[in-house]
Image: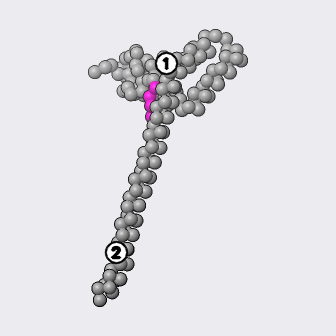
Amino acid sequence: MDEARTRDAEPARLRCLLEERTADLQRVKAEYDNYRKRVHRDRMAVREIAAANILRTLLPVLDAVDRTCAHEPLTPGLADIAETLRVQLGALGLESFGQEGDPFDPDRHEALVHHVSWDATLLTCTRILRPGYRAGPHLLRPATVEVTGPPPV
């Protein structure tokens, strides 16, 4: 009689062990999947930060090329260098911003001069002294501008 009970209990015990091991395996698999996703996300964040740092160090070169193009006769070689530099930096995610007529945003613009206009209702960028740059969500440099708007309060 005890032998019959043992035979009946054996499949139930094995089934219980199988369910425990399956649950353990699913838990380990979920932890590994989360680990892989976290590592991928961290690698992408490091890549973005590295690209932003490289782009930030190249901004003075881009400024020098832009000044040269504005003040020197534009030779084919200089035009090619300027265009290649802009294209390659753009491929790394560099975006220029700051246009005349943009509403002034203190998070993206740095105002050096404020011209008062009594009929204006908001601050507007009226002259771009130096363009701003960003790479994705990273602000590399604010645009330096002159603004026109109502008198300061």
Calculate the distance from the C-alpha at mark 2 to the C-alpha at mark 1. 76 Å
Q: Nearer the viewer, residue 12 or 104?
A: 12
Query: Mark 2 vs mark 1: which is more N-terminal?
Result: 2
Q: Nearer the viewer, residue 46 or 4?
A: 4
Residue at x 36%, y 69% (from the top left corner): 17
* Amino acid on which the number 1 mark rests in the picture: Arg
- For label 1, the residue is 130
Magenta part of the protein: which range? 136-140
Image location of residue 151, percent across then percent down: 33, 19
Instruction: Locate residue 85: give its quadrant.
Output: top right
Q: Residues within 10 Å of mark 1 (few under 14, many from 20)?
A: some
Rendered view: 50 above or below 80: below
Q: Are marks 2 and 1 in contact (CB under 8 Å)?
A: no
Residue at x 60%, y 13% (from the top left corner): 68
Image location of residue 86, percent across then percent down: 60, 25
Q: Of helix, strand and loop, which mostly describes the magenta segment?
A: strand
Residue 55 seen from this side:
yes
Image location of residue 108, percent across then percent down: 42, 27
- For label 2, the residue is 13
